[in-house]
Image (cartoon, grey):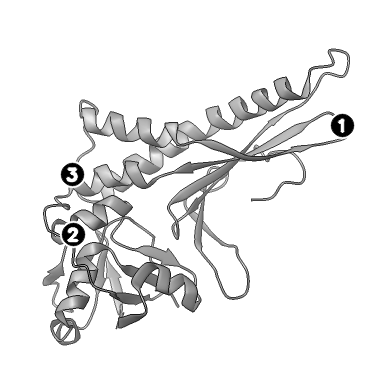
Amino acid sequence: MKHHGLFNAAVCAFLAFTVTGNANAKPWIVQADGIEINWSNLTARFDGVAASDVAKQDGLKDLERTAWRNGYERAVPVLDRVLRDQHAKTGTPVNESDGGLAKARSEVVKSVQSLNATFFASGAVEVSMEAKLRDGFAHALRKAGAGHAGTGGTSGGLVLRLPKGVDPAIAFWLVDSSGKVLFEPRKGSAAAVAQGAMGRWFRNADKSELSAIIGNSHETLNVDGVREGNRLVIDGDRFNALRDETLKALADGRVALISQ
């Protein structure tokens, strides 16, 4: 998140991809109406600004609170839209009477915190903020049927190497070339629900990042294509040859999805 200049009020294209990070570690970051959704750690970052009326001589704390409120009010509708979008991607209808959905929204909103503030000579203040999306996404996974299986408790994991044109999502299906479903969200365990996703998404990742997500050893599957409804096409024979601990890792969400 940049902290020079004022908040850019121009609306970015929803879910337009951008890449940030250093040469080795590139989290998968998506721009959503001026908010950065980080699919590697399931957080959202955004800015708020306030400009001081020099004659009024507002105190710095008042300005900072105004900037926080500005960013919060801009972000909440976008965060709600992202949450609703992920519910839809699991194939479950978004029901406004669902008390759980309301609680999921509340958890995301309550998680908003300030990271830092930048004060400019002009009297303006820019505050950088972050929201955690995990608890909101966990509700969507439960609605899709995940969470009934136990955890695998193994150290291994799985890497899914993706082709171009894949949108990040908390849930996905693995299918073979004929369309037969090999793995689906309802096979996800309580561990996947707890982390709020069936895996974490990277634009490349270094070894330390991978070990934090999937442990020190892992299997790799190449995704040959993507079909409607978050269907990732893989080699069925290769999938069937995976070890039991790898299948448990998949159920637990110990998966790194890496773009090529």
Structural crowding at the residue carrying mark 2, measured as other residues with C-alpha within 10 Å and reported as few (<14), some (14–19) or many (≥20): many
Structural crowding at the residue carrying mark 3, measured as other residues with C-alpha within 10 Å and reported as few (<14), some (14–19) or many (≥20): many
Task: Say which quarter of the image contains residue 259.
Answer: bottom left
Compared to residue 45, the image places residue 236 above or below, namely below
Q: Amino acid at mark 2?
A: Gly
Secondary element at image label 3: helix
Residue linked to disc 3? 143
Disc 2/disc 3 C-alpha distance (Å): 12 Å
Residue drawn 75% across and 32% down? 125
Disc 1/disc 3 C-alpha distance (Å): 49 Å
Q: How many marks?
A: 3
Task: Say which quarter of the image contains residue 19.
Answer: bottom right
Residue linked to disc 1? 122
Left or right, 15 with reference to 127: left
What is the number of the mark on residue 188?
Answer: 2
Q: Nearer the viewer, residue 31 or 221?
A: 221
Secondary element at image label 1: loop
Q: Nearer the viewer, mark 2 or mark 1?
A: 2
Structural crowding at the residue carrying mark 1, measured as other residues with C-alpha within 10 Å and reported as few (<14), some (14–19) or many (≥20): few
One can see residue 85 in this view:
no
Compared to residue 105, the image places residue 173 above or below, namely below
Residue drawn 41% across and 68% down? 212
- Disc 2 or 1, which lies upstream in sequence? 1
Secondary element at image label 2: loop
Residue drawn 54% across and 27% down? 73
Q: Position of residue 6 (x, y in %)?
A: 74, 38
Q: Amino acid at mark 1?
A: Ser
